[in-house]
Amino acid sequence: MSSAAAREARRKAILSRGTDRLSKLTSSARGEDNPVYANIDTPMQKASTTETFVGEESIMPTPPARASPVPVLNNPATDSGPSAWSTEQQQEFMRALMAAPELTGATLDSRGPGARPTAGQVYPDEGFGGGAGDDPMAAMLNALSQFSGQAPPGLGSMPGMPPMTMGQSAQAIPIATPPTLFSKLRPLLHLLASWILLAFSALVTEPKAYAAYSHSRSSGSWERWAELGWRSAKEPFGVHPVPFFWAFSTLQLVLHSAQIFMKSNSIQPPTLLALALPHLPPIVHSIVMNTLTYIQMGGMLLDDLAGLVVGVGVLVWLAGWVADGQ
């Protein structure tokens, strides 16, 4: 290449660099509305290199643009691990949640008018307390218990889900049964028994003890009981002490023993405790249930003591009313 051509190429390179700088300054002053920014497809001019300056640069053709290949969609059914649910298991889970499993004609025929569902079969009109339409919460609990493998006896679990162990099934809390007539009348029975014992002690046992102590029957029993309404407890009063404490303790032992032997004192633990009890060791399970039983018996004893105090007050008021009338 001659010196004139080299000078011309150098001059063009210098001018092109100056033109590029001027275009950048003009574009930055005009803002984003400038056509330079709008035309994004126009390639920028390459800077001058040594090969361009000497004229030895070999211009290679630009390769044609290729469209990006379409990504291959992965099939979750083929790439999923062994723990993934199949389509049938997902349908079984949805039917269990809706508490309406599809019954085939053979299942309906085999059920019969008086047939009961076997293990692993759940009918849509049966559950904890009836049909799903009657109690939606019971149907939801039924479905969740089947899904977790904690269904009560007579109800199966979800296909492919392992059932709970035999030890935990034996510790399951029984379903709450409706209270019997004896359970409903039990507080009234305790109150009547305490008041009958109080009346017997006040009208029969105390007069005999007072007569044996004073060797006199001049003072009436109603008047002695009426004095308790206005005398101070520090002052001596006419009512003679009797072993009422031991009689009341014996009565409580008899009543509570009868409840234990009749198995009428069923314990229903709180909801959170009932959920945790099947997962506790057998010893802890027994301790918790016995503690709840004794707490219930202690509450009933306090109720009987409160009823006894009310009975003493009624007796003193009635004695004062009778003594004033005599």
Image (spheres, helix red, strand yellow):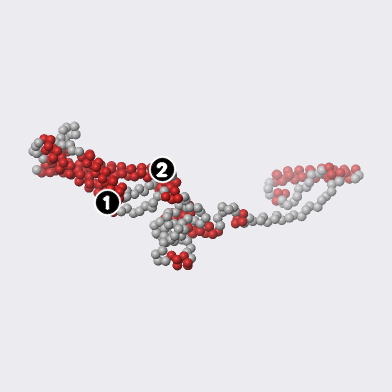
Could you give the CA–CA distance between mark 1 and mark 2, rounded to whole angstroms? Answer: 33 Å
Front residue of 220/106: it is: 106
| Residue for point 43% across, 44% down | 281
Front residue of 150/228: it is: 150
> Which mark lies nearer to you, 1 or 2?
2
Left or right of 250? Residue 120 is right
Left or right of 60? Residue 248 is left
In the depicted structure, whether residue 277 falls above or below residue 103: above
Assign the N terminus to one quadrant of the image. Answer: top right
| Residue for point 15% across, 40% down | 206
Find residue 217 and report its horizontal and vertical position in percent: 9, 39
Assign the C terminus to one quadrant of the image. Answer: top left
| Residue for point 20% across, 46% down | 196
Find residue 158 and report its horizontal and vertical position in percent: 49, 56
Where residue 318 sits, quadrant-wise, is top left
**Residue annotated with mark 1:** 185
Mark 1 secondary-structure assignment: helix
Disc number at residue 283?
2
Farthest right residue?
2
Find residue 267 and report its horizontal and vertical position in percent: 35, 48
- Disc 2 marks a residue whose amino acid type is Ile
Mark 2 secondary-structure assignment: helix
Residue 35 seen in this snapshot: no
